Amino acid sequence: MPRSMTGFGRGECIRYDRRFKVEIKAVNHRYNDITIKLPRFLNPFEDRLKKRLSRDIARGKVDVWVNFDSYTHKDITVNINEAFADAYVNAMNVLMSRYNWGENITAEQGLEILARNPDVISFDKFDTAVNTGNTQAEMWETLNAAMEIALEQFNNMRETEGAALARDISEKAARIKALLVQLTARVPIVVDEHITKLRERITDMLANLGHQLDESRFMTEVALLADRGTVDEELTRLDSHLSQLATMLTESGAIGRKLDFLVQELNREANTIGSKSTDVELARLVVELKSEVEKIREQVQNIE
């Protein structure tokens, strides 16, 4: 069963005092274009996420959002720049001596002044933790679990919509099949009517000239004209394409490009029949046929 290119899925997983949320959204696209938006410290996981998503997604514009929360002190590292602190204190001592402040600044006040400086005490959130083997494995396990939940929802939605698309295309193909039956029945009638009118016109013209119609030569010329104007081959190919379409709609995997090519062939045959049709009723049937083919083409654009 085909899948739609459009879909949405959300997944969440909490393990090791960490929570990952993953959202996947996709729309139609000619190629497979996956964009992952995640916190900078999780960049080491981006390639692994893309490879996993590419196993299930063959075509579409896919956007993935990753959100992370941590409730463990292991992911936070407090860094003290002692060299900067020493230089800062030395500078403060110079100022105290220069302005004769003496003992006006207590140790607690000096520590408070140092702590306010972001270059003395800095916080490393997650960067160090994610680069340690054990923590990285824990994070990937949690992130991957959240992604699998989101991906399952995403695929279920695409399969549901794909099944609806397949039903709609099948209904339109059935209408085309019915139109082919009408076209097939109408063509011989049109040929007979054309022969009758042509015979009458030629007989009248020859009578005015004092000649009689050569039946054998007339039928030969009619056969040549009929051969150039026949649409039997186009009708046969259309019927064959519809059978192929029905078969493709039962296949799994990425079949959108094959369907798109097949619809182009349907449209080509319909155009050829239209160019050969001089009968009003045939022209009307061809217009309806092309309309249904166009509706199928629009739906096929949504299939992966």
Image (spheres, rainbow, N blue to C red):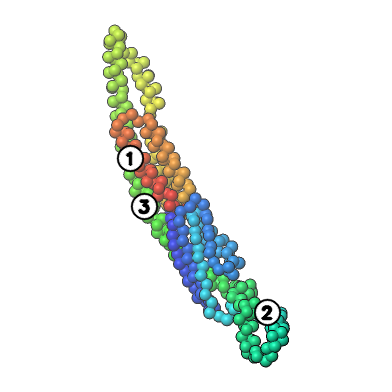
The N terminus sits in image quarter: bottom left
Residue 76, located in which quarter of the rendered image?
A: bottom right
Looking at the image, is 195 positioned above or below residue 301?
A: above
Indicate the secondary structure of the residue bearing disc 1: helix
- Residue position for label 2: 81
Instruction: Give the camera-side residue of 21 and 255.
Output: 21
Instruction: Give the camera-side residue of 248 and 32.
Output: 32
User: Mark 3, residues whose alpha carbon is within 10 Å: few (<14), some, or many (≥20)?
Assistant: few
User: Mark 2, residues whose alpha carbon is within 10 Å: few (<14), some, or many (≥20)?
Assistant: few
Mark 2 → mark 3, Cα distance in angstroms = 67 Å
User: N-terminal of the two: label 2 or label 3?
Assistant: 2
User: Mark 1, residues whose alpha carbon is within 10 Å: few (<14), some, or many (≥20)?
Assistant: some
User: N-terminal of the two: label 2 or label 1?
Assistant: 2
Contact (CB < 8 A) between labels 1 and 3? Answer: no
- Residue position for label 3: 167
Q: Amino acid at mark 1?
A: Glu
Contact (CB < 8 A) between labels 2 and 3? Answer: no
Q: Which mark is on residue 288? A: 1
User: N-terminal of the two: label 1 or label 3?
Assistant: 3
Q: Amino acid at mark 3?
A: Arg
Mark 1 → mark 3, Cα distance in angstroms = 20 Å
Residue 88, located in which quarter of the rendered image?
A: bottom right
Q: Amino acid at mark 2?
A: Asn
